[in-house]
Image (cartoon, helix red, strand yellow):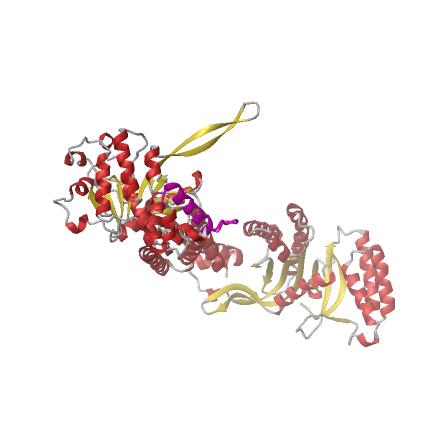
Amino acid sequence: MYRLRKALAIGFITGVLGALTSLTPFGASLERNQGLNFLFNFRGPLSPPSEVAIIAIDTRTGLNLDLPQRPKDWPRTIHVHLIDALVKKGAKAIIFDLHFFKPKSAAQDQQLAEAVKNAGNVVLVEQVNGKRQPISDETGKIVGTVWAEELLQPFPVLADSARGLATFTLPKNEAKVHGFLVFKESVGQAPTLPAVALHLALSTQTRPGLHSDGRNAEQLSQIMKSLRTYYSGNTNPVPPEQDALNGALHPALINMYQGSAFQYLNFYGPPGSIPTIPYHAVIKGFDPNLSEHQLDVAGKTVFVGYSDLYDPGQPDRFYTVFTNEHGVDLSGVEIAATAFANLYHQQSLQLPHWYWPPLGLLLFGLICGALSYVLPAFYGIPLILLLSASYLTGAIYAFNQHYLWLPLIIPLMITLPFSVLLGLFAQYHLERKRSQHFSETLNYYLPEHVAHELTANNASADAFNRVVHATCLATDMAGFSRIAEQMAPNALAAMLNDYFDTLAAPLKKYGVSVTEFRADAIMCAWVADNPNKELQINPILAALEAANAMHSFKQKYNLYNTDLRIGLETGEVYIGHAGGGGHFVYSIVGDCANTASRIEGLNKHIGTKILATASVIDGMDDVLCRYIGHFMFVNKTEANPIYEIIAPLSTATDEQHALCDAFASAVQTFQQGQWKPAATKFMDILTHFPDDGPSQFFLQRALSYQDVNNQPEDPKIIRMDAK
């Protein structure tokens, strides 16, 4: 049971380490940068989505169109040609990830605005400008700052012509992009480019009212914000106008409006995984590197922006898990198209509720830590590795099939090795402790000559088995169970060691032959081949000195409600190795030892500290004792005359002598069956000695025996019904 508890403790420590790590920024960073990388790389690219395409501007576009290299220097009529060509090819929606904030040529700006308006499906990007602004009180004193954001739209005539306006800012963690915003909450739940693109792509399939009522960007934005409020479970939902919402929303739209404003990207692969068509190929109508089918954009949502698959220094680039070996990052427009496809197919990476990973890591650590300790390394480590491989397989399957992102690095790179190392260290510590314990056992539980012969000379254990005459001394600490409940194990162990040292000193001083430690109890014996006075006086003096030593021990640990109980008996015992099944202990066996233990237990019933049989104190004229009575213990057939050992005669006080005399008279009256006079005598003793336990014990008996139905068989014998 102890090993199981320790195994569970090791597992719990391991699990807590993993769980807490998962809740820290460090743990989150590990999983984003290492775990997610592994999952994407192990899975590899996905089949490209067919509903989206990228119209890419790269370093060769200007050259192929006889235009300047930088798109900002191009005439805006080139974008008119692009829009007209895409409309002619049947593009469902045209999403520009290009900035048109400043007007240029009025005529060209007007042409572009008319082309955008005529197309009816063009979405333009807005820029989010943020800055920290001061906050002033009524006197104009600055009392703080606040971060404020605002949207910068394309020049007015173009913005008024667009079907939709949307921002697209990408959150970064350690310079890497892992996710995207569906709604920009800091600017009034403004929908982002992927969200607006999805709404245009799917709303016309099931809700034609949305198409007709959202003919401009402002109307479309209001409809989308209303849907977001309605479906996100706002406490005060504002249902959209029913006239504009006839029909059922596409499940992907409902999922988008109900989902988180931030979602993790499920990348389809390295740069170019989303079907990419060069900008100039759309203008010219052909490309020698692409087939007619690859140039087809009918029914597709197209994203227009910078995307160079060969230039690591391209503008609008973002470092991702699929940045290739040449240093080419994913472009912002491909990430926008990826986000759109994720929303369209409901493929965004899903994370469990925040509390599941810590709980799972706690369970994983608990199992690994417990197995690493409770099983031998030969079996435990392979089993743990098998468990870890099963978890890895399950995590990969969940990611590939259900887009569920589970922790990998923390369980497999932190929890797993830590559990194995901690378990092996604990096993090593356990084995070392066992070895030390064996050595200590020989020293503490065997006589010195026996331990020496067994360890040094490899003597047979049977050589030390013998029957001898002995005086057995049994001890117990009153109230130990309560103490153990209130103390930490290490503190309890230290206290017990000190306790045993305190008692061992007088025992060794008076030449104890064999000592057994049993939890908080001691069974020891002074042995000889024949009875002699030393077998009587030495145990008595050791008992008295041990009782005195207990006073200082109690003060040291503030254990004023506990005490030492001692029982003494003399007789023949077997000392030697006892046991079976290959397990033996050097023990004291015999009725003498059993009786000493029963006498020790009698102390708690009659309120005494040191009790002995008549054979122990016989002829001991230098010790003050008082006769307590004849007691028959449970499962015993004969009564034992029991005496309390009070003090050496040389140090005994007048009060102790007076108590002994008064008690002897009262016990004699009690044993004559004179219950009322006996009760009177015991009450008189308690008047002068209110804490005298034996007087309290016999008083209760005398009062009880006055009931004619409760008479004892023999008033001289006290029959105990409990140990």
Please identify the quarter of the rendering in which residue 105 is found: top left
Q: Is residue 44 visible?
A: no
Q: How many marks?
A: 0
Q: Is residue 639 left or right of residue 193?
A: right
Quadrant in which the C terminus is drawn = bottom right
Report the magenta residues as a range: 215-240
Q: Residue furthest left?
A: 288
Task: Indicate whether residue 323 is drawn in magenta.
Answer: no
Residue drawn at 33 percent across, 34 percent down: 157
Is residue 419 shown above or below 320?
below
Q: Position of residue 347 (x, y in %)?
A: 33, 53
Q: Is residue 591 left or right of residue 44?
A: right
Is residue 571 shown above or below 193?
below
Q: Position of residue 442 (x, y in %)?
A: 49, 57
Q: Position of residue 639 (x, y in %)?
A: 71, 71
Question: Which is more toward the observer, 354 or 22?
Answer: 354
Question: Which is more toward the observer, 516 or 507?
Answer: 516
Is residue 170 shown above or below 249?
above
Q: Is residue 137 visible?
A: yes
Please identify the quarter of the rendering in which residue 670 is found: bottom right
Task: Indicate whether residue 237 is drawn in magenta.
Answer: yes
Is residue 575 shown above or below 349?
below
Question: Which is more toward the observer, 557 or 129?
Answer: 129
Q: Position of residue 469 (x, y in %)?
A: 60, 66
Please identify the quarter of the rendering in which residue 250 is found: bottom left
